Image (cartoon, coloured by chain):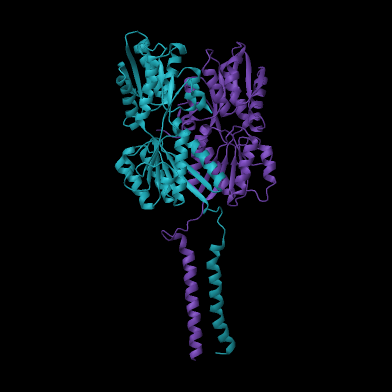
Chain colours: A purple, B cyan
Amino acid sequence: MKRMTRNNLLQVTILAVSSLFVVLTLIQTELPGSGQRQEPLEISVLIRESDNTLWANIRLGMEQAAQDYNADLRFLTPSTTNDPDEQLTLLQREVLQGADGLIVSAADPAALHRALEQEESPPPLLYLDSAPENALLLAPDNPGIGAALAQAMLEDGVAGRILLLDTSDQRAGIAQRMEGCRQALAAAGYASEVLYIEASSIPAVLPSLVMDEQIGAVFAFEPLATLKAAQALDGIRRCLPLYGVGGSGALAAYLEKGSITALAAWNEYTGGYLALQYIIGAAQGAELQQPAALQFSVIRGDTMYEPEYQKLLFPFTR
Amino acid sequence: MSRNIKSFCFRLPVKFALLCLCLSLLPGCIKPSAGQSDTLRIGVAVYDQEDTFISLVVQHLERAAREVEGDLGIKINLAMVDGRSNQTVQTDQVESFLSRDYDLIFVNIVDRTVAAMLIDKAQEAEIPMIFFNRQPVEEDVERWEHIYYVGAIGQQSGELQGELALEAWMGERTVDRNGDGVLQYVMLEGEPGHQDALLRTQYSIQTLTNAGVAVEKLANETANWSRAQALTRVSQWLEEFGREIEVIFANNDDMALGAIDACLEAGLEPEDFPLILGVDATPPALLAVQEGTLYGTVLNDAQGIAQAMMKLALALSRGENPEEAVDLEGGHYVWLPYQKVTLENGKDFLS
């Protein structure tokens, strides 16, 4: 009888201690000051420009999503613009360090993709602007952007030769924008000339080129090229229409000043937010589907302060 | 009760207890998604990301973080938020960093007079806070030992800008356009109440007058550190004073570039520009120096500020003495020197 009591006591004690463990485990995340916060997901964002100024609004959208979904953002800016090798090194390092998800504006999407496929268990990756076939891409309708910019020029009744700045290099999305523009211009009977150039070389090359009076308009198809072209044309005496892409504050300033005739822009803040929201979902095991294309608008200097466009160019008012 | 039933009754709780014990230990066995023990999480709150100099500091911070990661094998996650020149917005952002258990917070404060509130919250959460570029009042910084400020001495930037004007005045360039022996100037001021704006305005002119140069102020107005606002102000002054303006002092480079924009819009050739001077040595300003549209600027060492902040952050996160990591004055301040930049030495800073 005495032995039975001891056994009972032992069993009851074990049961009580174990139950306490279970209860504490269940409520530990709710206890104030427990220090057992759910670890944030780590999302690495690799851009291809060494100057991340043009990414300011996109980044703010991403930071907001990071806060809303408990993620840490690692925003990685390379030391050289459009350097596929440096970008690849950065990407491999992020994978090695256990990134939960990747968002990349790739200098060479195909090469990056091939390298990622060599990894044992790569994290989900979302491309911005340009992607290899069948990869996940968040971008506006790239050919549509080119066609819409061409349409803007046609509405302006510009005459002369049309100069298309091709800064796409290995990026299919940028090339698609240019091709969309070229086709729309050709359909309207305009001949266009393509200048293959690095965005950083535009200020040195463009001013002398456009002194040729026969050039009637210039097109750029990505934000950095548009900014460089606006800076280059701003310093010359000739007033030449420039059609470009992007929605940063710097580009809006040139649009207001008249150095840019029309901009194809989308809400970069929302784009950044959606990109992070998407990749967090993917990192948490959500079924991967191609994201919908971002909606864009063509904005001119005299329409930039209309409410719908103001929201695109200035996501925040001061 | 038969022996079998008793045995069942006794074994069931034991098995249940063991099961519970195993279950309760399970969460501890799950590997975190990203090992956070070797990750330094830093919140960066800036007053306005469109300020070119601040954007430059942030870029240097990111580069410094990647260098440290490569050298020390740790991860540094920088979360950047923009206060949009609104202290209420920034306070919310800093509170969010505190509630999300960031290891450190870098603050480029919107309103330097309300730092005490942020400092008290940081102390309560025991999270060190490093202010930069916009200096809180001294009494606030003294409130807690783990509050620091990294920046340059505003007075020195004003003095160096004054020296640049003095050198031009005494040199070969014809600054005294009307030959009256008096330096006529206009002053583009930064945000009202900002200590750098006040000090740069005061000491640039004081340096000239101390050297015996007679000066006449034609106009002064705030352009809030903004290129666009400076363009508007200088366009008005050019209409009003024309060639009477001999020197345009700008409290920062963005405003100096706005002055250049105004001169170009007015159809002036660079050789007909008044002498234009800025502060910060931002990349566009350095290019303007090379092009000859900006006479000179004063280097506000964005890279040095970023590197000092990162060194300080590392020391604090490792429990080391910060005075061994950086040159700390009064236990709280890291001061970076300014440098004069003109056409002669501008190329040294362009890279």
Q: Which percent across, then down, holds residue A174?
A: 63, 30
Residue at 45%, 45% in the rendered image: B313
B282 sits to left or right of A191: left
State the image coordinates of residue B4 (x, y, percent, origin top left): 59, 87
Q: In the image, B81: left or right of A111?
A: left
Q: Quadrant of residue A146?
A: top right
Quadrant including the C terminus of chain A: top left
Q: Position of residue B42 (x, y in %)?
A: 46, 46
Asked whether the viewer can see residue A303, the reply is no
- Occupied quadrant, residue A187: top right
Q: How many labels were placed on the picture?
A: 0
Up/down of A70 relative to A109, above or below: below
* Residue B257 drawn above or below residue B246: below
Residue placed furthest toward the top = B179
Q: B316 or A264, which lies in front?
A: B316
Question: From what the image shows, is residue A25 above or below residue A260?
Answer: below
Give coordinates of residue A230: x percent, y percent: 54, 22
Q: Is residue B271 visible?
A: yes
Q: Furthest residue to the bottom?
A: A1
- Front position in the image: A65 or B203: B203
Q: Is residue A89 left or right of residue A302?
A: right
**In the displayed structure, does residue A282 sit left or right of residue B348?**
right
